């Protein structure tokens, strides 16, 4: 298979730390102006050549998976290639201005910032956008705080947020953190929002409905206009989880569907590597009526000058300064380079690749027609076993066992970046793993640096130091 990668074998696993290689101790003179207790007499540093450093990091990178080494169809997470030109722009010394500089002295930066607010507003069909939140989950929290501020301002006594059972875990956490009771909404037989169940769930207590569209199995909520009406009639607001915007880019806008607030996962939709803990950005868009509650400050244009202004009823700050600016630069660069036509092409290819992949795999896909991602089921085979085995075939597996509406789910999102051949390789990895014996699946993966780990223990009792691991081995 094309994606068989030269990997670090399990036997070679011990990669010493650079400091374990050829350590050199430097004596430090005592002419430092700092107090004695803050200085040291000597410092031990590795003395290694450039090739040794390069090989060390290359070997480390081969011990793991990355989008630069092969496809990464992690459904819902949208792991896609990040163009190098966006990284170059973010690394340009002129891009990083000190956050305490006066607005007058950084007009160019504020112009880019303002442009991005407008681009995102246009893409989402929103009236105003804040770029401050540092992640999708932070965007959700900001958005729901805005909804809460709106209700409080209008004297609405609201205690509940309605969320489909299939929603991303952060939605539930957001609503709970904002102080709301969560009302879970079941899906109908088609895998979409059950409108009758929604009608029954909505009441005077409904502060908001949080929804992603297409939903977490890639299905477009066809009843979205009716759904919006039901929520609005109850006095609630409609929140859009923008993690699935890849399917709609340039074609449909949450604002036109009736959504009042949305977040954008800049690191899923508009370049910037996703994962590893960030940094990311989760801008939030709102309709005009909610603009006054946005975090402060907003960048606005006044008579040809870019200024910082605090919205009247602002919920306050949700991040330092203006957010993760170097991440936002990449989004600006990506959107500017692609333009409208490029964005339309992106969503077309994301949907085409998902549909082509699904047509090539032997696993059943229970719900459809889907857009940029689909949830296959491994049926009576354990989805996690099949996934581990896919690693042996040189591809990263999809998200497994979520959402729960599909038993043994393999939630798959190839994204727009994969070629036809690459999608076919992915399909082959699916099919080969799915056809392997139970015994093979249970012992997988065999060709990766690490064998199967005890996931529950790894999550509950993580050993984060190489040395601790060594000592215990
Ligand atoms: C990724 C994701 C989120 C959360 O976004 P982060 O940037 O990871 O915090 C929310 N909803 C859905 C559907 C997602 O896929």
Image (cartoon, helix red, strand yellow):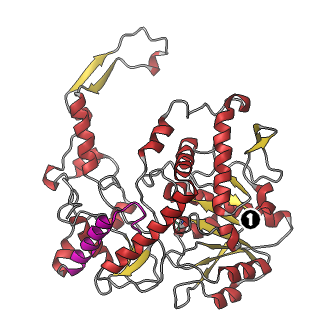
Which residues, given as a range, are shown in magenta? 413-435
Q: Position of residue 385 (x, y in %)?
A: 27, 74
Residue at x 50% of width, y 39% of height: 90
Helix or strand or loop: what does disc 1 sit on? helix
Q: Which residue is mark 1?
A: 147
Q: Position of residue 84 (x, y in %)?
A: 42, 44
Asked whether residue 417 is drawn in magenta, I would say yes
| Rendered view: 305 above or below 262 | above
Q: Position of residue 314 (x, y in %)?
A: 78, 52
| Rendered view: 173 above or below 324 | below
Quarter of the image with the N terminus in it: bottom left
Residue 123 placement, left or right of 414: right
Asked whether residue 61 is drawn in magenta, I would say no
> Pointer 1: residues within 10 angstroms few (<14), some, or many (20+)?
many
Q: Nearer the viewer, residue 451 or 269?
A: 269
Q: Position of residue 94 (x, y in %)?
A: 55, 30
């Amino acid at each position: 298979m094309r994606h068989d990668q030269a990997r670090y074998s399990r036997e070679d696993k011990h990669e010493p730390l650079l400091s374990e290689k050829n350590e050199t101790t430097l004596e430090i003179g005592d002419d430092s102006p700092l107090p004695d207790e803050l200085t040291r007499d000597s410092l031990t540093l590795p003395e290694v050549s450039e090739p040794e450093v390069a090989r060390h990091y290359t070997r480390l990178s081969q011990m793991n998976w990355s989008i630069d080494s092969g496809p990464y169809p992690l459904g819902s997470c949208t792991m896609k290639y990040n163009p190098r030109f966006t990284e170059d722009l973010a690394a340009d010394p002129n891009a990083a201005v000190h956050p305490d500089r006066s607005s007058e002295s950084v007009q160019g930066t504020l112009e880019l910032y303002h442009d991005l607010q407008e681009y995102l507003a246009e893409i989402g069909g929103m009236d105003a956008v804040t770029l401050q939140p540092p992640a999708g989950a932070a965007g959700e929290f900001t958005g729901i705080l805005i909804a809460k501020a709106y209700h409080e301002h209008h004297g609405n006594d609201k205690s509940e947020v309605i969320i489909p059972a299939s929603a991303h875990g952060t939605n539930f956490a957001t609503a709970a953190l904002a102080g709301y009771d969560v009302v879970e909404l079941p899906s109908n037989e088609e895998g979409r929002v059950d409108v009758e169940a929604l009608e029954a769930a909505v009441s005077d207590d409904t502060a908001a409905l949080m929804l992603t569209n297409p939903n977490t199995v890639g299905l477009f909520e066809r009843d979205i206009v009716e759904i919006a009406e039901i929520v609005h009639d109850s006095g609630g607001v409609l929140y859009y989880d923008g993690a699935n915007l890849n399917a709609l880019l340039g074609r449909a806008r949450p604002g036109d569907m009736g959504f009042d607030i949305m977040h954008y996962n800049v690191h899923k939709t508009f370049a910037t590597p996703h994962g590893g803990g960030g940094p990311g950005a989760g801008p939030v868009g709102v309709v005009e009526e909610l603009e006054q509650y946005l975090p402060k400050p907003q960048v606005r244009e006044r008579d040809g000058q870019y200024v910082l202004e605090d919205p009247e009823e602002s919920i306050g700050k949700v991040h330092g300064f203006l957010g993760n600016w170097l991440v936002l630069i990449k989004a600006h660069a990506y959107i500017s380079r692609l333009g409208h036509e490029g964005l339309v092409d992106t969503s077309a290819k994301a949907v085409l690749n998902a549909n082509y992949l699904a047509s090539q795999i032997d696993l059943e896909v229970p719900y459809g027609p889907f857009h940029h991602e689909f949830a296959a089921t491994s049926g009576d085979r354990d989805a996690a076993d099949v996934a581990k085995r896919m690693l042996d075939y040189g591809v990263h597996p999809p998200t497994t066992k979520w959402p729960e509406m599909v038993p043994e789910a393999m939630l798959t999102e190839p994204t727009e970046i994969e070629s036809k051949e690459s999608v076919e390789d992915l399909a082959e990895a699916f099919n080969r793993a799915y056809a392997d014996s139970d015994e093979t699946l249970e012992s997988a993966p065999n060709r990766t640096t690490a064998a199967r780990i005890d996931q529950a223990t790894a999550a509950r009792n993580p050993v984060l130091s190489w040395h601790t691991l060594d000592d215990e081995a």
